[in-house]
Structures are given as C-alpha cells and as structure tokens.
Image: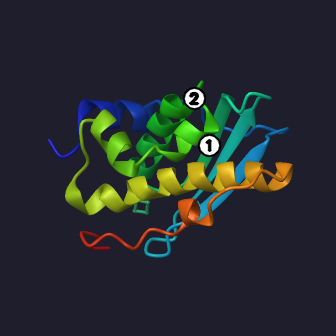
Amino acid sequence: MLYSEKVMDHFQNPRNVGKIEDADGVGEVGNARCGDIMKMYLKIDDDQVITDCKFNTFGCGSAIATSSMATEMIRGKKVSEALELSNRAVVEALDGLPAHKIHCSVLAEEAVKAAVKDYYDRNGIEYDPSLFKEKPDCESCTL
Ligand code: FES
C-alpha cells in the first residue's frame, strides 16, 4: 500500500483542525511547487509551553496528515523543543510517506517554525535567525 495506516488515519480524521482566535503565534507558509498553503496557530503560556495548537491547510492528503501529526507532537512541548521538530521525525511518526510526498511534510515543519517566529517577534524575544532559514527544496520532489 502506498500510504501507511497512520497516514490514512490522520488524513481522514485530522487532529486539531481549526483556528485559535487569540493565538500567541501564527504562521502561514506555502509550497511554491504545488501552491498548497498551511496556517498554524499556537497558544503559548508564560513558561513558553505550547498549550494548544491548531492548523488549517489547503493542501494534499500528505500535508494534512503531517500537520495533524505535527500538532500532536508539539502540544505540551516548550517552543524551543517545537523548533527542533523536523519533517523527518513527523514522517517517521506516521510510519513513512512515499518519496515524492516527503516535500509535503516540510510544510508542517515550516508552519510550526513560522508560528514560533511570530510568537518571538510579538514578544520581543531574541533568537538566532539561522533557526528560521528556509529549507532548500528537497531533491526527491517530482511535482
Ligand atoms: Fe502540495 Fe503535498 S503539499 S502536494
């Protein structure tokens, strides 16, 4: 089968879909290759812990599944830990994606990062800009 059971589950029953009206950080990213977009909302407490997160995606099934899994993985984590979440870790948690869909998982990682950056910017928290460098397009993309 092309997609793992976990991917199908998160695609058909995505967790944490929606919008947080009073979010502390919002990130919107797009994939230039396919035109898909994703918006990530984070609620962050005074200890920099992510207490809630939601996402909206106008994108393919793999983008939906990876964002759903990513929100599950960062909820309850500190923002600094959320920044370490790699698309590879999300793909592994989903028991893999077909090679030509790996780039879809980058959208989820970048959306989380963009939302954390927004939170840092809003609160005047200093950070290392290299944390937010754009990833080069992955070689395996065949769109
Ligand atoms: Fe665009 Fe998957 S994110 S094809």
Query: Residue 34's image quarter?
Result: bottom left
- Which badge, 1 or 2, comes first in the chain's sequence? 1
Is the CB atom of the residue marked by disc 1 within 8 angstroms of ligand 1's nearest atom? no
**Residue at the (41%, 33%) spot, across then down:** 10
Q: In which quarter of the image is ligand 1?
A: bottom left
Query: Residue 41's image quarter?
Result: top right
Q: Relative to 17, does residue 122 appear above or below in the rendering?
A: below
Furthest toward the left, the residue is 1
Query: Residue 60's image quarter?
Result: bottom left
Secondary-structure class at tag 2: loop
Horizontal side of 74 relative to 28 (left or right) equals left
Mark number displayed over residue 55: 1
Secondary-structure class at tag 1: strand
Residue to which mark 2 is pinned: 77
Q: Which amino acid does label 1 sit on?
A: Phe
Quarter occupied by the N terminus: top left
Horizontal side of 59 relative to 136 (left or right) equals right
Q: How far from the left and from the top, in percent, is residue 93?
A: 32, 34
Q: Which amino acid does label 2 sit on?
A: Lys
Give me the C-alpha separation between circle 1 and circle 2.
Answer: 17 Å
Nearest the viewer among 64 and 107 is 107
Quarter occupied by the C terminus: bottom left
Number of residues whose C-alpha sits closer than 10 Å to that of mark 2, classed few (under 14), some (14–19) or many (20 or more): some
Q: Relative to 41, does residue 9 appear above or below in the rendering?
A: above
